[in-house]
Amino acid sequence: MSAPSEQDATTDPGTAPAENSPAAGTRVLPADLLERRTECPFDPAPGLERRRGQGAVQPLPLLNGGRAYLVTGFEEARAVLADRRFSSDRVRYREATQMPPEEAAAQAAAIERGEPVCPAPIEARTDGMFIFMDPPEHTRIRRLLTGQFTVRRMKALEQRITEIAVEHIETMKTAGTEADLVPAYALPLPSLVICELLGVDYADRARFQENTAVALNSRSTPEERARAGGELYTFISELVAAKRATPADDILSGLIHEADPPLTDAQLIDVALVLLGAGHETTANMLALGTFALLENPDQLAALRADPDLIDTAVEELLRYLSIIQLGVSRIATEAVTVGGVEIPAGATVVVATPEVNRDTRHWADPDRLDLGRERASHLAFGHGVHQCLGQQLARIEMRVGFAELVTRLPDLRLAAKAAEVPLRNDMLIFGVHSLPVTWA
């Protein structure tokens, strides 16, 4: 649940503008770092593979004339994500990937001369985009959310998640012997769950799913993202107002009525935007892409069917192997820091290439092979440090149930198209497949 959402920048002066969205930033990254190949859809983009052996931390020229640093080593990535000298704050600091050419070139020249790159003069953040905050502002909102994502609440959800999975599989079977797994199963399962958690009417799901897709599409224009962000903001504003007037047993109601001091409406809207967008996009794509990977690795699928107890390690291996956050996450050095023997100057943007980090040959043997029996080792699919994914336990439960029920109730599940014909989400911040045609006897 670490994928960001956007909103209309005019709604709150502390919120990052739409043109500074992560989706917009991908336009200045070399395409070979982002677009995976149809013949190898589960491997990192070819540009990442070509950079193997060139250092765990590498200079990364950007298409706007700026320069960043690419981190591909596992230990180096953990070091960056755990180091408070690397900022997540997208209001105070500017990423090189978000700059127009003139500004990017000027910043690169200033960094080269050793001149300080100062943050924006903001005394306090008034928004709630906690994924783009540093402590202590991040700490307060994160603590409030941790109090809502309790172990009790997550465990209580497991039975409900199973009911949702079984219901959708049985609906697929009743309808015939073929389906597109994305709309029939992978998307509704986490969408229903996050709607129930936040107290969103599932009938309204199209309103946030369509606009979230626009916000996360790297090919959307600034105007399209602004429109989608505005509609999302209006939708969540109405929801916050309804929960303030009539609370229920859901996370949003808890944030409204239990936070002390209380969160503002603007903060609540931002938090809900992040949770709602991340809560369905990430797990939905893991379920679809993970099923695709299992179908293309029949020996591993057979091992899982033969030993259902493999499911926990299978989920962790699929998370490592697929690493669906396109390229990864970024940070900005607030002072000069040496990582992996490379000095990263103050003000420089650092891109942690999660798909390649999770294939580090120094950390895993034969990392390009899907091995559900692999001895479990830590991965960075959920990030690391203070920004490690808040909803990771929920995502694990959804995947554990989602994969287990699918392979058990459809024992002869197979692709209904050639693998090369499955459309990949190379245009989206969250990698996966746009559709997955499957069939069964």
Image: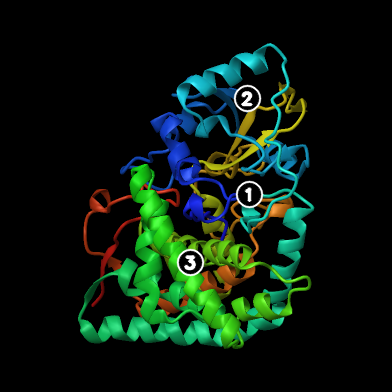
Q: Nearer the viewer, mark 3 or mark 1?
A: 1
The amino acid at mark 2 is Gly
Location of residue 387 in the rendering, given as x and y in whole percent from the top left corner:
68, 53
Left or right: 335 in relation to 434: right
For marks 2 and 3 on the same chain, the one whose residue lies earlier in the sequence: 2
* Above or below, comparing residue 69 to residue 127 in the picture: above
Location of residue 92 in the rendering, given as x and y in whole percent from the top left corner:
67, 39
Viewer can see residue 298: no
Residue picked out by circle 2: 55
For marks 3 and 1 on the same chain, the one whose residue lies earlier in the sequence: 1
For marks 1 and 2 on the same chain, the one whose residue lies earlier in the sequence: 2
Colouring mode (rainbow / by chain / secondary structure / one colour): rainbow
Q: CA distance from mark 1 to mark 2?
A: 28 Å
Q: Which mark is residue 294?
A: none
Looking at the rendered image, the quarter that the N terminus falls into is: bottom right
Q: Which mark is residue 132?
A: 1
Q: Residue at x 33, y 66 (%)?
A: 182
Q: CA distance from mark 3 to mark 1?
A: 41 Å
Residue 254, picture quadrant? bottom right
Location of residue 396 in the rendering, given as x and y in whole percent from the top left corner:
58, 68
Q: Which mark is residue 303?
A: 3
Residue count near mark 1 (Cα–Cα under 10 Å), binned few <14, some 14–19, many ≥20: some
